[in-house]
Image (cartoon, rainbow, N blue to C red):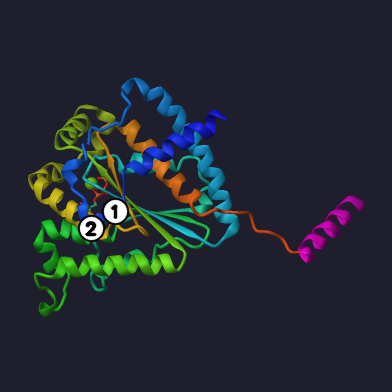
Amino acid sequence: MREKLLIKKARCLAQRYAVTDGKKFRLAEVDPGDTGEFTSKDKPAFKEMLAHGVMHLAALQERLYASDRWAVLLIFQAMDAAGKDSAIKHVMSGLNPQGCQVASFKAPSAEELDHDYLWRCQRHLPERGRIGIFNRSYYEETLVVRVHPELLEKEKLPARLVTKHIWRERFKDIRNFEKYLAHNGVVVRKFFLHISYEEQKRRFLERLERPEKNWKFSAADVAERRYWKAYMAAYEDMIRHTATKGAPWYVIPADNKWFTRLVVAAAVIDTLESLDLEYPKLSAEQLKELAAAKRQLLGE
Ligand code: ATP
Ligand code: MG
């Protein structure tokens, strides 16, 4: 009973951060330090909710796999150190690895640049019955590539196709692509983990100060902070143009990891619950076969 209540509470929390119609979205209205009505005193309760949530998620995943109809694609986007990796790790910790596929998208290779930008992502779309996770995605094509125009030049597009409309065109193509996925039973949910400029600095300093975190530090990430404003503008525009009812963005405050993880888990639970997943129903014929197999085994 208590478990059900906790999960219900968490799902309400997730719905609060869902953007299903981008038109009115303003990034400035989302405070990265927001923790709803909770404070750090609630951390232990959140841990408990997350543990229940992860167990519940595992049960839902099993039904997703058994029913073998829907696929779920979870896309994670964020500035560096916002906690993408750890959110993925915590939320997916209870899942069956056989039903899960993670793909990370870095700067494109020479081979990838020889194709349209969706090509490399399409190859990693989840199969039916699976949960696919994109750690960064085709959305980078409207973020890092927009902030650094020299990356667009490297994409080898015919010159006449590169106009001032290119970002609008990309948004439209992405909306259509996600619609196409929806029509094919691939449920797309997108997460923007929204960290503040100050918290990012704190986490970078921690990477420098703690030897076991040194490996995560990259000087290039610090240099990228100069473009913070441009990134925020690109993120806002991206969400305004690509948050739809069918493929919403969850804009999740990310200055407090305990909060972020729970909201992500709850959003994934909410998504799977909405699919009304059932174990496959066997036909009378199949049930007869099972009964015969049972008789045979018992008769051995
Ligand atoms: P972490 O730093 O936490 O290990 P990460 O996702 O930042 O994880 P990195 O290896 O640091 O991984 O970097 C991936 C880099 O690749 C990011 O800077 C991202 O902007 C860049 N990238 C991803 N997609 C594209 C793209 N289509 N074009 C250009 N750069 C891209
Ligand atoms: Mg990085």
- Residue type, mark 2 in image: Glu
Q: Which residue is mark 2?
A: 140
Measured along the vertical axis of the image, is residue 221 above or below residue 288? above
Query: Which structural element holds mark 2?
Result: helix
Q: Is residue 41 visible?
A: yes
Left or right, 80 with respect to 245, comes to left
**Residue 51 at what x, y percent from top left?**
48, 32
Magenta span contains residue 179:
no
* Residue at (38% x, 70% y) in the render: 180
Quarter of image, res 49: top left
Dominant SS of magenta comes to helix
Ligand 1 is within 8 Å of the C-beta of the residue at disc 2: yes
Q: What's the CA distance linking mark 2 and mark 1?
A: 7 Å
**Residue 117 at what x, y percent from top left?**
26, 68
Are circles 2 and 1 on residues that touch, CB within 8 Å? yes
Q: Which mark is residue 136?
A: 1
Q: Is residue 218 visible?
A: no
**Residue 84 at what x, y percent from top left?**
31, 43
Measured along the vertical axis of the image, is residue 59 above or below residue 121? above
Magenta residues span 284-299
Nearest the eye: 144 or 263 = 263
Query: Which structural element holds mark 1?
Result: loop
Left or right, 153 with respect to 129, comes to left
Left or right, 16 with respect to 289, comes to left
Quadrant containing the N terminus is top right
